Amino acid sequence: MARPRHALTAAAAAFAALAAAPGCGREPAAGALRFWAFGREGEVVKELMPEFERRNPGLRVEVQQVPWTAAHEKLLTAFVGRQTPDIVQIGNTWIPEFVALDALEPLDPFLSRSPALAPGDYFPGIWDTNVLPGGVFGVPWYVDTRVLFYRGDLLREAGIAGPPRTWEEWRAALAALRARGAPGSFAMLLPTDEWAQPVILGFQTGAELLRDGGRHGAFRAPEFRRAAAFYVSLFREGFAPPLSNAQVSNVYQQFDGGDFKMWITGPWDVGNFRRYLPPARQEVWSTAPLPAPGPDALAPGLSLAGGSSLAVFRASRRKDDAWRLVEYLSAPEQQLRFYALSGDLPARTAAWDAEVLRDDSKARAFALQLRHVRPTPKVPEWESIAQRVAERFQEVLHGGVTLEAGLEALDGDADQILEKRRWLLDRRNAGAR
């Protein structure tokens, strides 16, 4: 999440056809175990390798760091050329695409004989991102989700004791913050070029987003329409400005200055707030699970199941060695070391019992929210559809398009993007008969 993603396209389908063609020989398995990791994760995970190699004499790991902006295309190119690594960090929204390409090894046989790993060791919604027809194709490595960042001091000044737990309390809190805000300030920031917020609200109302087994869009269904109406009302009522991320000059400085009092964002911004706000200002901001739509405040509203997993490529000739590395990186002590190095939240729930997380007031909201998350639709085309979600809502907020017309257009977008999927599924079903 929060990093560049791409959906399965006609080009990816062409890659699959090329990979099946003769003449693309695979190099023999030799030398180091090859591990590709992305962004800063690829840099810091190298520090965990000496201990792994010490525990596994004769086994050497070669970590290749790949920029996030190049990762997707590099993986597809490697798949075409039959030069994939043995083990890879993979964003959990990429998994359906690479499963569709038959590129990833099902991990169920490894899990069945592994005393170190079990599905119950993970947040259920996060684990589910790795489960597709045919098995389990990844093991969560680190996790993220979205929670509510808020100015607790300004809430208290407005007469509100704590963060909102329901949509009704949320609206009341926003109204109170708006009433006390300086001219030109807003109660909340909801960047209009992000698809996550309306999708999260849709999750909370029970929206499916896609219907008929992922064949068609379901954005005009009553559940999503309710969420969309609430989302749009936050702008119409002046609680949030219709600004994109590019139109916000310095969100941390503006949040500290009171220009925005609430913001839905992820764990990466915990580190950013601690880095960019002075020590004397660290107590003015807090985090909380997302409000729920109904009156039941015992559990928070749902949020996105995000993060990255560890997967093994089907073409690897060293799957057992790759699995040893998966087990090692999944151990709670290594998860905590990786958290200390990268700031990425551990996927193993046992790691959250450690003092460094248990006693961190900013992390508690994530510990609770991660038990209430849901994966995005598990179709390779999802990220193309997600981009259209952001674009269609921008038209509603900026272009004078009605919400109903925007949702109708969004369903049309989804149906067009899913056209090839419908053809493939119908063809497969016809063959099965």
Image (tube, rainbow, N blue to C red):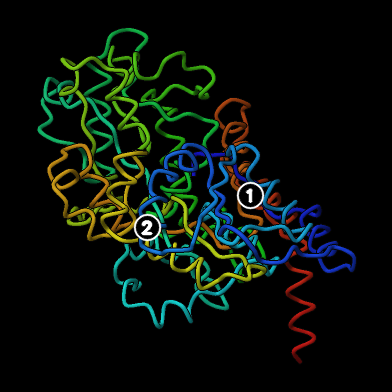
The residue lying toward the viewer, choosing from 225 and 242, is 242
Instruction: Say which of marks 2 and 1 sits in front.
Output: 2
256 vs 343, nearest the viewer? 343
Q: Which residue is mark 1?
A: 385
Q: Is residue 415 above or below residue 68?
A: below
Mark drawn on residue 346: none
Classify 5 as above or below 24. above
Residue that extends furthest to the bottom in the rendered view of this protein? 433
Question: In terms of image quadrants, where is residue 397?
Answer: top right
- For the C terminus, give its image quadrant: bottom right
Q: Secondary structure at mark 1?
A: helix
Q: Position of residue 18 (x, y in %)?
A: 85, 61
Side (left or right) of 86 relative to 57: right
Q: Which residue is mark 2?
A: 54
Instruction: Decide which of tag 2 and tag 1 comes sooner along the chain.
Output: 2
Q: Amino acid at mark 2?
A: Arg
Identify which residue is drawn at 73% across, 74% down. Answer: 425
Give the side of residue 142 with respect to residue 11, left or right: left
The extreme top residue here reads: 183
For the residues labelled 2 and 1, say whether their Cβ atoms are less than 8 Å apart.
no
Q: Residue at x 33, y 7 (%)?
A: 183
Residue 273 is left or right of residue 140, and the answer is left
Question: CA gap, disc 2 to disc 1?
Answer: 45 Å
Residue 399 image offset from top left, x and y in percent: 63, 26
- x and y percent of residue 428 in the render? 76, 80
Number of callouts: 2
Residue at 47 percent across and 38 percent down: it is: 43
